Image (cartoon, helix red, strand yellow):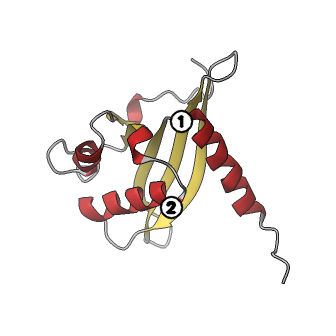
Amino acid sequence: MIAEFNPIIEIKNKIIEEVIKTNYFSIIVDCTPDISHQDQISFIIRSVDILKTQINVTKYFLGFFKVDDTSRKYIFEVILDEVKCIGLDIDNLRGQESDNGSNMKGKHQGVQKRLLDINPRLIYTPCGCHSLKFGTL
């Protein structure tokens, strides 16, 4: 049986290869309902390529993930599962950006705290603080 070519999987695999090469990465996660009122998480990875002569910051949109629960614990598990599933090392996660929802930020109980518990080098930034100028420093 010949495997079918799936361009979406191929593109995602190339993105993951690029992020693994740069070693360190950050995630941008937002939880919001779609038009049918189904909650979903948008998942973006940002990496900094310092291996070349010019420093490049790149953001990669990896997709939307349906969520059945918007609790802190569930969203944390979705993030952790996706990072592991795509083959990235959670110890190389250096940043987490998300909306200012209490389930996401929360220094004591939110997703931010849960990620800090497993990786204390992580820096949390609310989405409103990051620049929309992609690829420039």
Which numbered marker is on residue 87?
Answer: none
Q: Residue at point 36% right, 44% down?
A: 99
- Mark 2 highlights which residue? 85
Q: Position of residue 6 (x, y in %)?
A: 77, 67
User: Disc 2 marks which amino acid?
Assistant: Cys
Q: Residue at point 82% right, 68% down?
A: 5
Residue 48, quarter of picture? top right
**Viewer-proximal residue among 15 and 128:** 15
Specify whether residue 71 is in view.
no
Q: Position of residue 129 (x, y in %)?
A: 39, 29
Which residue is farthest bottom?
Answer: 1
**Helix, strand, or loop for circle 1?**
loop
Q: Position of residue 105 (x, y in %)?
A: 26, 44
**Helix, strand, or loop for circle 2?**
helix
Specify whether residue 136 is in view.
yes
Is residue 113 toward the left or the right of residue 44 in the image?
Answer: left
User: Disc 1 marks which amino acid?
Assistant: Asn
